[in-house]
Image: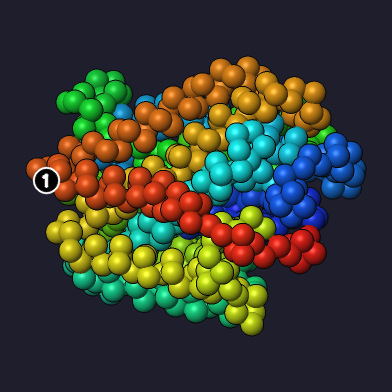
Amino acid sequence: MDGGRHEGCRERSHRGLAVAASARISRPDESSPGLVVTMSAMDASAGRSVPTTAARTRAPASAYISWIALAMMTTSSVASLRAAPTMAVYGLACVFLYIVPAIVFLVPTSLVSAELASGWDGGIYNWVARGISKPMGFLAVWCQFAMTIFYYPSLLGFVASTLAYVINPALASNGVWTALVIVVVYWSGVWVSSRGTKGVSGLASAGLIIGTLVPGVVLVTLGAVFLGQGNTSAAPMDANHLLPVWAGLSSLVLIVNNFLSYSGMEMNAVHVGSLKNPAKEFPKSMFLAMSLVLLIFILPALAISWVVPAEELSLTAGVMQAFDAVFANFGAQWLTPIVGIMLVSASLGGMLTWLAGPSKGLLLISRQEGYLPPVLQKRNKNGVQQNILVAQGIVTTVIGLGYALIPNVSSAYWIFSVITTQVYLIMYLLMFVAAVRLRRNDPDHARGYRAPMLTALCGVGFAASLAALLIGFVPPSQFGSGNTATYLLIVAGGALGLGLLVPFLFYRLRKPSWKQPETSEVAAS
C-alpha cells in the first residue's frame, strides 16, 4: 500500500491467469498495480462452498507458467526504490533488518496465501469469511481498501520530493509544496480513473524497468565506483556494524516499514494452480523471488548510506539525494533531473493503473452484502465507483495537508507510512487466523498446494505482524525530540479509527435496503 511496498496494497494488470468468473482488486505499488484479489460473485454473495471441480480446476497445459516466470512476476510486484532511504539510515545493519522481516513475515504470508488461493476463490474476503465470519471478511477487505487512504499521501510525498529535484531541490523539504503536489496529482488521478480510461496499465509494467531496475543499477554501480575511488563511506561498513545499535525499542521502529515493503506477496498466490507441480515449484519460486527482492532492496539502501550521512537523509528525497551526490562526484549533475523524471513517471503510471482497484473490490462486496450505504455504491456512466473515489479523495486531501502542518516532511512521511502498514497488518492477522481454522475445520477440501507446518507458519506470521503493528506506536528515535502524545494520538487515530472504528460503524448501521446484488454483472466482469 513498498515498503516500498507497503511502504505499503502492496493487484496486477499483467497477471491474467486468475479464474475467469472473478473480479479483480488492486493494491498499490509505485512500479506496478498490486495485490490481485479474485472474488467469485456467487461465492461471495451466497457464502456457499463452491464445488471442488469448479473451484480448483488445474490450468490447461498451454496455460502453465514456469516457477521462474512466477518468481519474476512476484519480484516486479514488490520491488521498489522508495523504501531504500528508510533503511539506509541504519547503514550496513539494514541487511539484518531486511532479512529478519523476510523470514518471519514474507515467507509465512507467501506460503499461507498460496494454500488459501489454491483452495478457495474470492480473495481475502472469501478466505476470512469462510475461515472466521462474514463480518471479519468485511473488515479484512475494508483494511485492504483503507490502507490506500494513507498510502497515497506517503507515495505522493515521495513523488513530490523527487519532482523537486527536477525543479528546485530546496522544495524537497517544503511541506506546502509536498501537500500541493499530493492534492493536485491525486485529484488528477481520480479524474482520469472516473472516466474509465484504459491503456495506462502498460505504464505500470514498464515502471519496474524505468523506475526501479535501471535507476537501481545505476545508483549501486556509481556508488561502488565512488568507494573504489577512495572516498570514505558515510556509514561504517565493518563487521562491528552488522547489527543495529540498540538504544531502546525506538531505535528499531523503522523496521516496521519493511512489513509494508513486503506486503502484497500474496497477490501472486492466485497463480499457484498454473504451476505444473505446485508443491515443489511454488516454494522454489517464492525463495528465488525473495532473494531477488532482497537484492533490490538492500543494494540501493547500502549505496545511499555510502554517499548520504544518516543525519542528513530525507525519507522522501533520500534516493534523489544519493543520485545528486554520486552524479556531482562524476561531474554529471545534469542527469539528476532525468532520473527524477524516470522515478516520477513510473510512480504516476502505477498510480493511474491501480487507483480504482481496492475501492472496486469493496464496492462489489458491499453491493452483495449491503455493507456500505447506497450513496457510496453509486457509479457514474462509465461504471466507475466515483462516489467512493471522491469520499476517499476528501480524506486523502485532509491527510495530505498534514505535510504542510507537520514541520518535518520526513516525520509526516513516516507517520503516514506506519498508519498504512498498521491498517494492512490487521488484514494479515485475520488471514493467518482464517488459514488455521480452514485447515482445521475443512482438512479434506481440495487444495492445489498445502503449506508445510501451516500452524507454525501462521503462528510466526501472526506474532510478527502483531509485533510490527504494536511497535509502530513507538516514535522512532531517528526523528529526534517530539511530542510523544501527539504522535501516538495521530497514529492510533489513523490506524485504529480508520482500520477498526469506521468499518464497525458501517456494519452496525447497515440496512437490508443497502443490498444491491448484481450477480450477472460481477460474473461477467
Residue 477, horizontal then vertical, whole percent: 17, 37
Residue appearing at x 37%, y 70% in the figure: 394
Residue 377, horizontal then vertical, whole percent: 58, 68
Nearer to me, 309 or 476? 476
Left-right relation of 476 to 158: left
Tell me the quadrant of the picture where the C terminus can be found.
bottom right
Residue appearing at x 53%, y 57% in the figure: 510
Left-right relation of 395 to 448: left
User: Does any portion of residue 12 appear in the rendered image?
Assistant: no
Left-right relation of 359 to 477: right
Residue 170, horizontal then vertical, whole percent: 18, 67
Residue 219, horizontal then vertical, whole percent: 39, 50
Question: Based on the displayed image, in which of its 4 quarters is residue 339 positioned?
Answer: bottom left
Q: Which residue is mark 1?
A: 483
Residue appearing at x 67%, y 37% in the figure: 130
Amino acid type, residue under disc 1 in the picture = Asn
Nearer to me, 452 or 164? 452
Residue appearing at x 60%, y 79% in the figure: 380
Nearer to me, 452 or 444? 444
Q: How dense is the environment of label 1, judged by Cα within 10 Å: few (below 14), some, or many (20 and up)?
A: few
User: Does any portion of residue 143 appear in the rendered image?
Assistant: yes
In the rendered view, would you say 275 is above or below 226?
above
Residue that extends furthest to the bottom in the rendered view of this protein: 381
Q: Give the colour scheme shown.
A: rainbow
What secondary structure is found at the residue carrying circle 1?
A: loop
In the rendered view, would you say 518 is above or below 250?
below
